[in-house]
Structures are given as C-alpha cells and as structure tokens.
Amino acid sequence: MFKKYIKPVASLEKKVEIFWKRYMAGRPWVGVHVRGSDKCNEMEFECEQLDRINAFNAFNYECIDRIIELNPGIGVFLLTDSETVLKEYRMRYGDKLLFTEATRSASNVGVHFMNDLDGIKIGEEVLLDSLLAAKCDYFVGNLSSNVSLAIQSMRNWPIGLVKLIGNNARKESLYLHDRSQTPVFAEISRNC
C-alpha cells in the first residue's frame, strides 16, 4: 500500500537525497527508531516502571550492538522524538551516530502535543527521517510505534534485516490482511 499510495512530494525527496549523499552514502547503516516523551504513557506500562523501560532499551542496544559487531564500519542513524534518548545514544555510539535536526521533547509531552509548533514541519521531519531509515541496510524499531511499522512497510526488506521490538499495537483486520496473498517483507522478532 505504501508503494502504491504514498508518494512524497519532490521537494522532500530532494531533501532525502541531499542528506543521504552528504552524510550517508558509501557506508552501511542501521536505522533505529526509539520513541520517548509520551510513548511510555501509550504503552502497557507507566513511565515509573523503569525496570521494564530499561529492559526494552537494553534489548534495543543488544540488537544494535550485535549488528555493529557483525558490521564494524556501520553507522547508526537515530530517529527519536526525545532529547533524553538522543543524549543516551550519543554517549553510547559516539561518532557512529547520525541524526537529523528535528524537533524533540525534553519531557513526557509528545512533540505532537506541544503548543506553538508547526504541525506541517513536524510531519515533514518524521517523514524525512522515515524515508532515510528505509534506505538503511538494517532497521531496529518499536513494534508499538506507527512510525516503525511504516518504515517496515516502505520497502521489501530482506528477511532478518528488520527487528521490531515490543508489543504490537495493531490488530489485523481479516478483511485487509489476507496472508495467503501477502509477500513477506520483514521478519518481526523479539530475538536478535
């Protein structure tokens, strides 16, 4: 459905190509989508349950670290709405880390709920990041995030190159999801 119905405007496609050529071309990449801010409020646990959040983040790191171990020259392209997550990833991955200049939250208020922000600009930032992540060699994301699920759907990923971690937020519609007619685009697994 993405390939058939979603077509970014030419100006956004040009931004993707410029960023890719300037910062990402010629090197393998793992795209990583990590929600912060309000996402923990949407999930099945509360922000105060830090042990479960930390376990989720630790598993994310485990997957990324394994990909780096197998591909020592690989870069980490981070998509996040959280300044805290960005700071943690900077400390952990140093000069391997790349990210776009996007609007981020320093609290548990989601970017899309912040006052006085331009919704079109925020949407463009998310789409730019998503299109860049879809060009990466690997992708690690959150199974309960629409952005991660969209990135998984944006291309025909070879088996094993996509890891979506967590609990699925979507229920399949028997009318929309006829698995006998659907090609496998990515492996969804909780194992690295």
Image (cartoon, grey):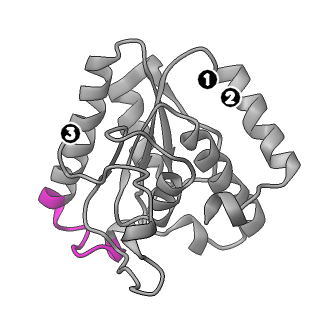
Measured along the vertical axis of the image, is residue 116 above or below residue 142?
below
Measured along the vertical axis of the image, is residue 169 above or below residue 163?
below
Q: Residues within 10 Å of mark 1 (few under 14, many from 20)?
A: some
Q: Is residue 90 left or right of residue 132?
A: left
The disc label shown at residue 192, or none: 3
Residue at position x 44%, y 64% in the image: 182
Question: For the view shown, which residue lies furthest in the left direction?
Answer: 51
In terms of depth relative to the viewer, which is nearer, 73 or 182?
Answer: 182
Q: Are marks 3 and 1 in contact (CB under 8 Å)?
A: no
Question: For the view shown, which residue lies furthest in the right direction?
Answer: 11
Amino acid type for the residue under numbered disc 1: Met
- Give how far across and how far down residue 121 sits, in percent: 75, 59
The answer to which image quadrant residue 20 occupies is top right
The disc label shown at residue 136, or none: none
Residue at position x 79%, y 44% in the image: 13
- Please tell me which of labels 3 and 2 falls first in the chain: 2
Q: Nearer the viewer, mark 3 or mark 1?
A: 3
Return the residue at label 2. 20
As for residue 49 lying within the magenta part, the answer is yes
- Please tell me which of labels 3 and 1 falls first in the chain: 1
Bounds of the magenta segment? 41-52
In space, the residues marked 3 and 2 are separated at their CA atoms by: 27 Å
Amino acid type for the residue under numbered disc 3: Cys
As for residue 45 lying within the magenta part, the answer is yes
- Give how far across and how far down residue 151 sits, in percent: 52, 53
Q: Is residue 35 left or right of residue 121?
A: left
Amino acid type for the residue under numbered disc 2: Trp
